[in-house]
Every structure is written in structure tokens, then in C-alpha cells.
Image (cartoon, helix red, strand yellow):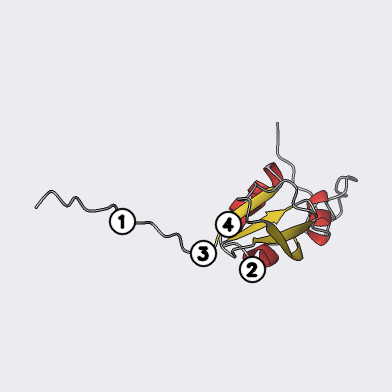
Amino acid sequence: MRNHEIGAGERRSALPRIGASSPSYKDHEMRNPPNVHVFVSADGQRIALSTLPDGGNLPSLTDSERWLPLALIPMTSDSLRTYVTDVRAATASLAAEGFHVVQIGARVIPFPQPHRGST
């Protein structure tokens, strides 16, 4: 089989070209990203992102704590970056589970009690 280059006078295929200017589903998704609801724990130690307006899919906190609504943002990298450091992990969790939780406060790890009998 011989390769044939298209000359200046020859016509290309009638099929439409798919390129940067062609709209696609992904382009539509980026123009109209879904909204993400941002919640903060009552103690201010955790941020949660949810696809549900009431945060009904968020993990339960202790009896004295609850999730408080904080913001409504579009699910874009720039918007998510305001609340999380790992945008890819947050996006994957939101797509798979419908929520993502981030620890924002420092965790206190107590030292074990010293053994008084050993000297």
C-alpha cells in the first residue's frame, strides 16, 4: 500500500475535525461544574465537602459536635484549593463517595506515661 499525501488541490475528508475549538462533553462539564457544599465541624478542626446540600452523606461526629454549613462553591480546582491541599484526592472522593473530609487542626498526640519503676 502506498502512502498518499494530500496536495493543495485535493479535498480532505468530509468528517468534522475534532480539535481545541470543537465543543465536547468535557468542555461542557468545565463550563458548568457541579456545586460543592462546604461544611466545618463545630470545633473548627475539620472541613468537609459534600455533593448534598444538607451534608447528609458526611460521617457522623460525636454527640456534642455537628457539621455547620460554611459555603457553596463550584467544583473547580481553584475553588477546592481554598479548602483542601490535595485537589485531586478531593475530586476523586467527591466523584466516588459524594464527600471529602480534611483535618485542619493540629492533632495532639499524648506521650505515654513514663515507667516510674525503671531507673
Instruction: State the residue in front, 17 or 74.
Output: 74
Amino acid of disc 1: Phe
Q: Secondary structure at mark 1?
A: loop
- The residue lying at 29 percent from left, 52 percent from top is 112
What residue is disc 1 on? Answer: 111
The answer to which image quadrant residue 21 occupies is bottom right
Amino acid of disc 3: Gly
Q: Nearer the viewer, mark 2 or mark 4?
A: 4
Q: Is label 1 in contact with label 4 (beta carbons under 8 Å)?
A: no
In the rendered structure, find residue 48 and report the number of the disc placed on it: none
Amino acid of disc 2: Thr
What residue is disc 3 on? Answer: 105
- x and y, in percent, of residue 108 in the image: 42, 60
Amino acid of disc 4: Val
Residue density around tag 3, few if under 14, some if 14–19, many if 20 or more, within 10 Å = few
What residue is disc 4 on? Answer: 102
Sooner in the amino-acid sequence: mark 1 or mark 4: 4
Q: Nearer the viewer, mark 1 or mark 4?
A: 1
Number of numbered tags placed on the structure image: 4
- x and y, in percent, of residue 100 in the image: 64, 51
Sooner in the amino-acid sequence: mark 3 or mark 1: 3
What residue is disc 2 on? Answer: 82
C-alpha separation, residue under disc 3 versus residue under disc 1: 19 Å
- The residue lying at 45 percent from left, 59 percent from top is 107
